Image (cartoon, rainbow, N blue to C red):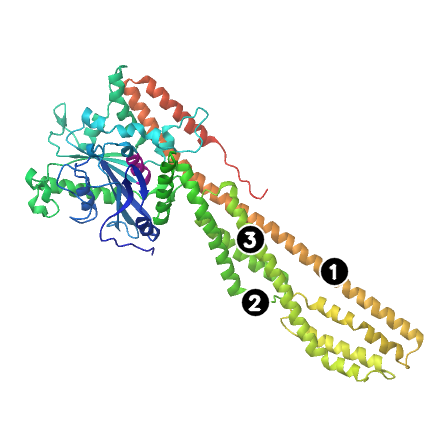
Amino acid sequence: MASEIRMPAPVCLIENTEGQLVVNQEALEILSATKNPLVVVAIVGLYRTGKSYLMNKLAGKNKGFSLGSTVQSHTKGIWMWCVPHPKKPDHTLVLLDTEGLGDVEKGDNQNDSWIFALAILLSSTFVYNSMGTINQQAMDQLHYVTELSDRIRAKSSPNSNGIEDSADFVSFFPDFVWTLRDFSLELEADGLPITADEYLENSLKLKQGTTQSDQNFNLPRLCIRKFFPKKKCFIFDRPTHRKKLGQLETLHDNDLDPEFVQQASAFCSYIFKNSKTKTLSGGIKVNGPRLEKLVQTYVDAISRGDLPCMENAILALAQIENAAAVQKAIAHYDQQMGQMLQLPTETLQELLNLHRACEKEAIELFMRNSFKDRDHLCQKDLAAQLEKKRDDFCKQNVQASTDRCSDLLKDIFSPLEEAVKQGVYSKPGGYRLLIQKIQELKTKYLQQPNKGIQAEEVLQEYLKSKESVTDAILQTDQTLTEKEKEIEVERVKAESAQAAAKVLEEMQIKNQQLMEQKERSHQEHVRQLTEKMERDRVQWLDEQERILAFKLQEQARLLKEGFQNESKRLHTEIQNIQKSMEKPRKTCFLS
């Protein structure tokens, strides 16, 4: 189970002081420790419209986010409250309460648009809170939505015209919920009752005409329709008498209007049930550390005078996590090899088989924990590190076998060496006795277990180092004729050559096994990369299908409403989506 943070009260996530947006380190530390997947709900709206009350209800509290009781804006910047998700186990609900927009006391409202944009970028559900009905004044107050394409970039490199399709935004924009406070109208159209959602859809209908007034009327509606595939509306009666509004934190539900209590309960239930886990392009689920990095990246971009870019933020996040994924994979490999490998191994293939099994697990672990590995740089780094570790283990195996065999030879042949020094074999017939003894000791050596892959090579090197001593005893043995000595010398040479050939053959076999293992490692990387890319592509195609369905639905609506030009522009976006879905994806790794 992932860790869960308990916050008794909200903290400021992004401070807005003297026109500057600054990230609060305390809030980042809280996110860093929150390992659960996050459902992020942000609320935005004009100041003094009751945003904080709704967020406190979502937190299951009456107090928390500052409500205030005057016409002054209480919340400054963006405040954060992380609470256990009441309906999704092992998930954390992150509530973001934003500074009220349009506060006349601020004088300079330049950061209002940035706060609006950040709420969009960070959330999985975006709540826009306003007072009264959806009329033109309410739409005019929502002008921030028309500036989103000037405040946010989906890609680091737009298309050839320098323009980004709205489809680029749809892929990562949150669900949109409009909450209407102190709503006093009857929900009906043409004399028939309608739902709050139908009321919202009717309010988003466009107006025929080409005047500037018509364009001003249509622009915010078009933006909401283009950017937010999923839209929801809730209406709220006034909670209580005006004089008691400042006491909402202390009032119980039975002190409030029953209709309002029911409406607030329905809103919370919807958010708990339908708000999705915050997910980035490619199906990357956001946890606390990822949200921490996103916040830093976006605010840093704004501070530099740049536009927050979703693609750049994901790539920056990927660089950190992919590097960590490499280290995690290497640590797993080291642990598995450390537990299962006993040096020296009897054969090189035994070591390579174990390496291959641990390598496969390490690659799988990397694939699970990595994403957006541009040009497969991190996977190539992993491959290089695994290859080096394999080579290091091979060297250690050789050394362990050499040491083991050298120790065995010393123990077994030491008595013989001492006897030679004492002149035991420097006598007539001594050479044959020496050769007989050497054969006995060789047999004893070869019967010893756990010598490893250097058994023959170390033995031959040892015997070769003693050839001069053996030859001296041969030449001084008076029982042998000169012809017999010549024959024995040739026999020894032939035996030595045969042994050398055997060692050479073993080396060639080892080299062949190493080459085959390198090719298997390469193929394993390619196989797992291909499978991952295919999974990613299936997920991406599903995402594009959803966007395409939304765009086709919106195009049909525009045609029905008689907006041919807007429909044509949307048709171009639809064609671009369809073309991108037809392009094959290629796998190129370590080529």
- Specify whether 91 is left or right of 415: left
- Residue identified by numbered label 2: 342
- Residue identified by numbered label 1: 504
Callout 3 crowding tier (Cα within 10 Å): few <14, some 14–19, many ≥20: some
Q: Position of residue 113 (x, y in %)?
A: 29, 32
Nearest to N terminus: mark 1 or mark 3: 3
Callout 2 crowding tier (Cα within 10 Å): few <14, some 14–19, many ≥20: few
Residue 328 shown in magenta? no
Quarter of the picture containing the N terminus is: bottom left
- x 45%, y 51%: residue: 324
13 or 286: which is nearer to us? 13
The type of residue carrying mark 1 is Leu
Dominant SS type (magenta) = helix
- Which stretch appears magenta? 114-123
Residue 275, image quadrant: top left
Q: Report helix, strand or loop for mark 2.
A: loop
- Residue identified by numbered label 3: 385
371 or 22: which is nearer to us? 22
The type of residue carrying mark 2 is Gln
Q: CA distance from mark 1 to mark 2?
A: 25 Å
Q: CA distance from mark 1 to mark 3?
A: 29 Å
The type of residue carrying mark 3 is Gln
Nearest to N terminus: mark 1 or mark 2: 2
User: In this rendering, which labeled residue sits more in front, label 3 or label 2?
Assistant: 3
Residue 116 shown in magenta? yes
Q: Report helix, strand or loop for mark 1.
A: helix
